[in-house]
Image (cartoon, rainbow, N blue to C red):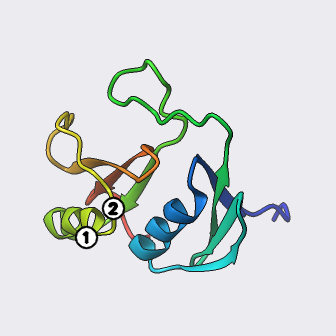
Amino acid sequence: MTGIRFGSVSLDSDDPARLADFWANLLGGAVAFSGDDFVAVKLANLWLTAVRVGNYVAPSWPSDEVAKQIHLDLAVDDLESATATAIGFGATQPDHQPGDGSYVVMLDPAGHPFCLTTQIPED
């Protein structure tokens, strides 16, 4: 045991409250701290934070004109249902969908790509 554990993931944004609300809703977390420039979401085993960045530019995925900055993979049981849920909370589904259909690429409200996938084992 190293005494080191994973603590949080921070996402850049021009609207931290909107981004944090999206992730809290999608992942069943709760906003535990909210300020103008920083919002923290408490999840089961992780903190996810949204941080205001001046002159924020959203990723331009799938082009690499503006780098994607981060990519999250979310394990799901049903791609169709999870996609509809994510869209209901404010995600968008880009037209470009690479791969073999075992995952769906989505964009969060700040433009960060994330995937919904049935290919991550539970244990």
- Dividing the picture into quadrants, the one containing residue 61 is top left
Q: Give the residue pinned by disc 1.
A: 85
Percent x, y of residue 5? 75, 63
**Mark 1 or 2: the one toward you:** 2
Position of the N terminus, as image quadrant, is bottom right
Q: Residues within 10 Å of mark 1 (few under 14, many from 20)?
A: some
In depth, the one of 60 and 8 nearer the eye is 60
In the displayed orientation, state which residue is furthest to the top. Answer: 65
> Which labelled disc corresponds to residue 61?
none
Name the amino acid, label 1. Thr
Location of residue 51 with respect to 49 vertically, above or below: above
Location of residue 96 with respect to 112 vertically, above or below: above
Name the amino acid, label 2. Gly
- Dividing the picture into quadrants, the one containing residue 84 is bottom left
Percent x, y of residue 39? 66, 66
State the SS at label 1.
helix
Location of residue 103 with respect to 32 vertically, above or below: above
Q: Relative to residue 71, is residue 15 drawn left or right?
A: right
Q: Give the residue pinned by disc 2.
A: 90
Percent x, y of residue 54? 68, 39
Write the residue at 40% across / 53% down. Answer: 108
Alpha carbon distance from label 1 to label 2: 9 Å
